Amino acid sequence: MRFDDRPSGFGVIDTGHTVQVNLAPGHWIEVGGRRDERVQFHLHRPSQERVNGRQSERVAHLVHRDRDGRLAVVAVLPARRRAHAVAQQVWNNLPLAQGEGVAARGTLDMSDRLPPEPTYFTCTGSLTTPPWGEGVRCMVLKAPVAVAAEPIRICSRLYPMNARPIPSASGWLIKASN
């Protein structure tokens, strides 16, 4: 897995279910020779994934689409550590009401927040919100990414529970990268 990010425009929408950041072109992921463009990311509380049996209090889902319309979702689990410029830019542009969107001023640069060649778990799954589309390439980063505590608290107040239950992994083929 390799992330390829550069500063780009973005918009923030409070969907009534989550905070979603829609991205202008310029954010990519490459996995196994397939290159997908990141179109948005959104947040869930608690995480809809477990790593080593542990569920995180929050997760960001980075949603990507290839040229054929196939989806790939990367789950990024937070580790509370230091200030996070990307999170601060999102909160600075948060709409005042549910269902509202804001075309943000400035650009969003995720290049210093995502590891250049991360290790991850992967399986084929489904979207975690309606319409629950199947055949989604799902990847969960093994290591958490540093996020400031304040944005996590803000999002937790807005959406104290907006995750589906974690499905049983029984029968799933889950692979791990090196």
Image (cartoon, rainbow, N blue to C red):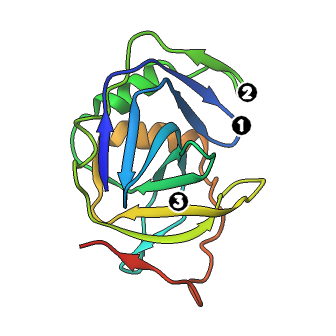
Disc 3 target residue: 46
Nearer to me, 60 or 154: 60
Q: In the image, what residue type sits under mark 2?
A: Gly
Q: Secondary structure at mark 2?
A: loop
Above or below for 58 versus 166: above
The extreme top residue here reads 105
Q: Secondary structure at mark 1?
A: loop
Q: In the image, what residue type sits under mark 1?
A: Gly
Q: In the image, what residue type sits under mark 3?
A: Pro
User: Mark 1, residues whose alpha carbon is within 10 Å: few (<14), some, or many (≥20)?
Assistant: some
Q: What number is the disc on residue 99? A: 2
Horizontal side, residue 177 vs residue 28: left or right: left
User: Mark 2, residues whose alpha carbon is within 10 Å: few (<14), some, or many (≥20)?
Assistant: few
Disc 1 target residue: 16
Q: Are marks 2 and 1 in contact (CB under 8 Å)?
A: yes
Q: Which residue is at a point 26% across and 35% down the rendered structure image?
A: 111
Q: Looking at the image, can residue 70 be seen? A: yes
What distance separates the C-alpha of mark 2 from that of mark 3? Answer: 22 Å
What distance separates the C-alpha of mark 2 from that of mark 1? Answer: 6 Å
Horizontal side, residue 114 vs residue 135: left or right: left
Q: Please state the horizontal and vertical placement of residue 95, each as a whole percent of the image.
A: 60, 20
Q: Which residue is at a point 41% across and 80% down the rendered structure image?
A: 53
The extreme bottom residue here reads 171
Query: Which one is earlier in the sequence, the residue at label 2 or at label 1?
Result: 1
Nearer to me, 126 or 143: 126
Above or below for 118 versus 25: below
Q: Please state the horizontal and vertical placement of residue 38, each as a whole percent of the image.
A: 47, 39
Q: What number is the disc on residue 90? A: none
